[in-house]
Amino acid sequence: MKFNVPESKVFYIAVYDIASEKRLQKVLKVFRKYMTWVQNSAFEGELNSKQFHSLVAELIEIIDKNEDSIIFYHAEEQKHIGKKIVGIEKNEIIKFF
Amino acid sequence: MKFNVPESKVFYIAVYDIASEKRLQKVLKVFRKYMTWVQNSAFEGELNSKQFHSLVAELIEIIDKNEDSIIFYHAEEQKHIGKKIVGIEKNEIIKFF
């Protein structure tokens, strides 16, 4: 008998700085498969370990490791991370402040 | 008798999307006063409530609220947020992965 243990997910915020427009477009395409676009240089999403490693593997194939930089901030529980927006919320066009 | 209660600080990650180069330069100048630059579109820093409100007040004076967007992710304790870097760490030129 097998139990399906739900795999724990981690909340990620990805911030990227890609030096070439061509690589940027490829990076965005990969991110969209795994995470939600929130702003020109940020994605958010809950990923399990397998998904995160697939995402990183795909990104590493694209980026120039000497020029490009991708930072993943992560929290075990999304409730530990709050969010405040100044200006427009580009993803949903909702204004705060 | 007065006690000096140490004011609690919150860890912030700021991600910004500023539509005009002129406003961007002003926004960067303000951020540098309060937080640490980590990447072209992100700053990090621990701020107390007063510092955060001063920062936001300065930013609101600069940005166009219909075009620009600044997201602050925050955590009460920095230990709740992990960080992984793919590619170069622009702030310190240290490679991970």
Image (spheres, coloured by chain):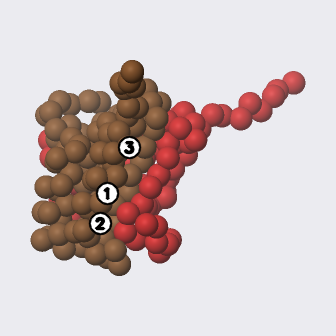
Chain colours: A red, B brown
Circle 3: element type? helix
Report the residue marked by disc 3.
Answer: B49
Q: Quadrant of residue B22?
A: bottom left
User: The residue under label 1 is which amino acid type?
Assistant: Val
Name the foreground residue: A47 vs A39.
A39
In contact (CB < 8 Å): disc 1 and disc 3: no
Residue beneath the point at 40% across and 37% down:
B10
Q: Position of residue B47 (x, y in %)?
A: 32, 39
Give whichever of discs 2 and 3 has the lower sequence position: 3
Q: Position of residue B82 (x, y in %)?
A: 41, 31
The numbered dot on residue A62 is: none
Report the residue marked by disc 1.
Answer: B56
Q: CA distance from mark 2 to mark 3?
A: 16 Å
Circle 2: element type? helix
Residue beneath the point at 26% across and 46% down:
B43
* In this view, B40 is above or below B66: above
Side of B27 relative to A59 (left or right): left
Residue beneath the point at 63% across and 34% down:
A8
Report the residue marked by disc 2.
Answer: B60
User: The residue under label 3 is which amino acid type?
Assistant: Ser
Q: Quadrant of residue B85?
A: top left
Side of B61 relative to B4 (left or right): left
Q: Is residue A53 visible?
A: no
